[in-house]
Amino acid sequence: MVAYIESLTAIQIILAINYLFVVVALFTVLFKNNNPTKTLSYIIILIVLPFFGLIVYYLFGQEYRKQKIFNRKNVLNQSTIKKYQKALAVDEEELVKLEEELLDGKVKLIKLLNSSEDAPLTRCNEVEIIRNGENTIPRIVEDLEKATSFIHLEYYIIRDDETGNMILDVLCNKAQEGIEVKLIYDYVGSSLSNATMERLSVAGVEFHPFMPVYFPKFTSKLNYRDHRKIAIIDGKIGYVGGVNISNTYFNGRNDMYWRDTHTRIVGQAVGSLQMHFFMTWDFVTEESYEIVNAHFPKCETSNRTALQIAASGPDTDWANIMEAIFTAINIAEDYVYITTPYFIPNDEMITALSAAAKSGVDVKIITPEQSDSWMAKHASASYFERMLESGVRIFYYQPGFVHAKTMVVDDVFTTIGTSNMDYRSFNINFEINALIYDEKISAEALSHFKIDLAESREVVLEEWEKRSFSNKLAESFTRLMAPLL
């Protein structure tokens, strides 16, 4: 009996400590003045689920964007960065001219981000859309081999398999030639053996993991991850898009056909990729690094493609990518065509897409029927019925897994990048997209969309409503986990 009382007292003490932390967390949640539904959800979890509620809150309830875990000023305050930004400053008169030239009333898109210090509008650019990893990776290798000054890479996934070694071998060779080579890789997404890291180190490659965590196999969805895919060569050539560096993304070396989209950029916008790379490098190394003019060379192309680089994550003041996509949908007049591997939209996207479709805009979404995640597939499916009822047309890609993250609007705007149409990309992960204002590029992106559309089957509302009870149950269950997927 005494032992029982003692054990009971111990439990009570532990619960008291739990609820002491809960009280602190509750005040924190309340004073954030967030969405009432979200706030109430966290309050219920914290009160009803001892210990587990605290774990959920501290993993997912923190607003790191406002806590500024990145000290971006270390980079943005450097004179070379300020010089680059000043050279790209666009006044109101130039925006009006740009609108008259090609934007067809959509200059709001540029204004949305142009006020941000790290998303300047660039006009001197040449853009190439590359289809699939087996075309993208050899092209990157080709440019890496020609590097004469420096190479900077930032990737969510880089593995030392056959495909990864195509890149890693070049990095080692270039570093041994005396060229500066820097690599940032996400600790959870990537997989590099100790032997590979030793090889990189001996060759002179500087490499750092992004936010190392313990037990990465069990925490892949529970952390703020660097989901970006950036390659910069000599400050003149840049790559950004959906293709990571591993056999999975290289058709012929994988188990399932992988449909992806990447971009190769030559020109001023590479400087924006460079700026974001430096901000991440500053974070992962915690070392001062002098940025010089050579990192932002003069544009060598005569092409005049207008382009902004939008980055978002806990290091940005605003959800830049989500706001850009939201604005593009809202001002669309003819069509919005989206390709995304994970369609788990937040309330803002649901409202924007539904309103656009109901107002007569042709809204089409291509998403995979074969998914690499059972939970993500069913969570995505839970949104279909409402979308279909509002007039949004949804298509299941058939040949394999579509991993491309693209949107084209009204023949004048295209975005290609790393951001999925889901909670994690909009609110949690570090993402980066190219926002392109150009009729030629939009036409090319549209042609790729039409090719994929021809290889997709449409989800019809009448048939969708007849799906099995087990599927509906799985959808409802996984939707509860949507913000965590």
Image (cartoon, rainbow, N blue to C red):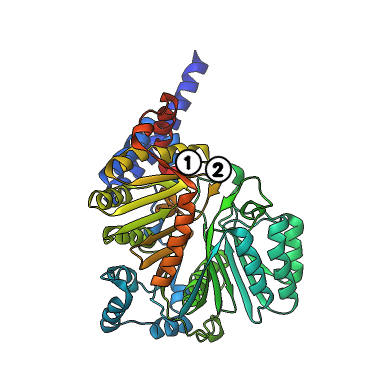
**Amino acid type assigned to the residue bearing label 1 in the image:** Ala
Could you say which is closer to the camera, residue 254 or residue 30? 254
Residue 375 coordinates in the image, percent (x, y): 49, 37
Total labels drawn:
2
Residue 378 coordinates in the image, percent (x, y): 45, 36
Going by the image, does 383 lie left or right of 203?
left
Residue 391 coordinates in the image, percent (x, y): 29, 45
Q: Is residue 326 visible?
A: no
Element type at mark 1: helix
The quadrant in which residue 94 appears is bottom left
Residue contact at pointers 1 and 2, CB within 8 angstroms:
yes
Q: Residue at x 45, y 63 (%)?
A: 445
Q: Residue at x 37, y 36 (%)?
A: 46
Q: Which residue was labeled with disc 1?
A: 376
Q: Residue at x 35, y 46 (%)?
A: 393
Q: Which residue was labeled with disc 2?
A: 372
On residue 226, which mark appears? none
